[in-house]
Amino acid sequence: MAITLCVDIGATSIKAAPVTDDGVLMSAIRSLKTQAPLRPDELVKRITTLAASFEDVSRVAVGFPGGIEAGVVTDPSNLARNKDGHNEASVVEAWKQVDLNSLLSQALAQPIATANDADVAALGACDGVGLEVTITLGTGVGCGCTLDGELLIHREIHDFVNQPTIRYDGLLGTKALLAMGEQYWSQDVAQLIAKVVEIHHPDKIHLAGGNAPRLDRRVLNPWEETVWVHREPVGILGGAALFS
């Protein structure tokens, strides 16, 4: 049985744990602070440090918090932002067309699979039946979709709900939650869910990420048979499926 070291890169912390092929966590999750803005070599060092604390893993899966295609970074997103929320130009430049798969393969000498972190969470959350949408609620807001358990092409949440000028990280991310309080923030999350249902009619919506359990469940009453809130670390658990 192959054991995958699954790494979930967030704006606040980088988490890792070994996971079996069927999505079972093999040990406690360990983490390091992300400390953005973060350059590629610094990220690789953090992942290498975490990997060294686990034994008997045969491959590594990484959920990346931005744009990544076939292992090549297209947008570093939160990893390039400073504490004021602005992109550091030199860090953005450092990430241009970085082949993260190759860097990690050289550093860890193991097979590497990478995907957007919300897509990995979608694999960890889905039941494998019909169209399922996973919305991750954390420092920012992400979105991943599966159809009968297979990942669909990644789309950012603002494009997914046909709101290209809206940046949901600012509207529904951690800063917004702290500023508005859980009640009003929950109502705004419910408005996003309503848009997803209206446009896409998914069979199920999964809410994941560190802030998902803070939702006022009453706002989910209109979709009580459709929307599921996850407390388990689906952003870790879904990593093993990248090798399926």
Image (cartoon, rainbow, N blue to C red):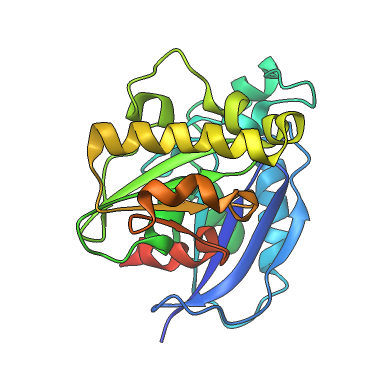
Q: Residue at x 59, y 62 (%)?
A: 108
Instruction: Return the residue found at the far top.
Output: 165
Q: How many marks?
A: 0
Front residue of 70/200: it is 200
Can you say whether 83 is above or below 134 in the image?
A: above
Front residue of 87/72: it is 87
Left or right of 238? Residue 90 is right
Q: Is residue 74 visible?
A: yes
**Image quadrant containing the N terminus:** bottom left
x%, y% of residue 68?
44, 38
Front residue of 152/160: it is 160
Front residue of 237/244: it is 237
Q: Is residue 109 visible?
A: no
Q: Residue at x 35, y 31 (%)?
A: 195
Q: Residue at x 60, y 20 (%)?
A: 93
x%, y% of residue 160?
34, 30
Q: Residue at x 58, y 59 (%)?
A: 7
Can you say whether 144 is above or below 67 in the image?
A: below
x%, y% of residue 149?
26, 61
**Image quadrant containing the C terminus:** bottom left
Can you say whether 149 is above or below 184 in the image?
A: below
x%, y% of residue 236?
54, 63
